Amino acid sequence: MGSDDERSNAGPGRPSKVARLIDEYAMEGVGAELEALWTAEGDARSSLRDLADRFNRELVRAALEREDAQLLVGEYENLYRLLTDDDVSGADRTRARRRIERAGVDVDALESSFVSYQSIRTYLTSHRGAEYDPGPSDPVKSAEEHVERLRGRTAAVTGSKLEQLRSQDYLTLGDADTVVAVNVTCRDCGARYEVSELLARGGCDCMGSKYPHSTM
C-alpha cells in the first residue's frame, strides 16, 4: 500500500504522470483517496474511469487555488465539466476557458495535464502497489464495512461543504463535528437499532417469534 508521501514510494526511473502532478500541485491525500476508492468493495468501489475524472477535477481545483483564485462552491467541478463534456456548447466552453485564463492558469497546459484511466491504473499498481482482489468475504461484515465507508464519506463531504460555506462567509459555524447515524426501524416489531447494532445482534425483536433457533 502507498502512503500519503507520494515521492517516498516512487519506483526507479521517472515517476508516473499522476505522481508527478500530485507533487507539482501539492495534492496531499489524493493518492490515498484514489487507492481507497479503487480497492473498496461493492458499490463503494470506483472504476478507473471515474477515478480519472475525480483526479482531473481535483487538478482543476489545485491549479486555480495555486493562483489564489476565489472559487464558488462546486465551481471547479463545473469548470471541468464545461471543458470536457461532449454536450457542452462552444460558447459555454469558451466562457469556462476565459474564466480559468483570467485566474492566471494556462488552459492548454492544464488540459494537457488531464490523465486517462490507464494513467490512474499505472499509478495505483506500479507507484502505490495497490491491488484489487474482491475475494470471498463474510456478507454481514462486508455489509457493515460498506455502510461504514459510506457513512464516513457522507460525514467527510458534509464537513467539507460546511467548511467551504463558512470560509466564504455564507455560514456562521463554530468548531463542529459532523456525525452521520444510520438507524433501522422494523415495521413489524417496532424495534429500532443503529445499523451496526442490528448487524451485530443478528436481527431485530422479530427473531424470537419468526426464528426461534436463532442465537444472539
Image: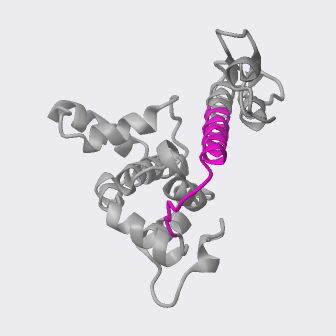
Residue 194: image x %, image y %? Answer: 75, 26
Looking at this view, is 101 or 192 the one in front?
Answer: 192
Q: How is the image coloured?
A: one colour
Q: Check the image and name the residue furthest to the left.
A: 90
Give the residue displayed 67% in from the left and 20% down from the top. 210
Residue at the image point whose x is 59% and y is 55% from the top: 137
- Specify the principal SS of the magenta part: helix
Q: Is residue 17 left or right of residue 141?
A: left
Residue lying furthest front in this view? 213
Residue sitting at 22 percent across and 37 percent down?
Answer: 94
Residue depicted at 58% across the width and 61% down the height: 26
Image location of residue 189, percent across then percent down: 72, 10
Q: Nearer the viewer, residue 156 or 103?
A: 156
- Asked if residue 136 is positioned above or below residue 164 in the image, the reply reads below
Picture quadrant of residue 84: top left
Range covered by the magenta-colored residues:
131-157
Q: Is residue 178 visible?
A: no
Can residue 155 be found in the magenta stretch? yes
Return the x and y of residue 128 as percentages of the image width and height: 55, 73
Quarter of the image with the N terminus in it = bottom right
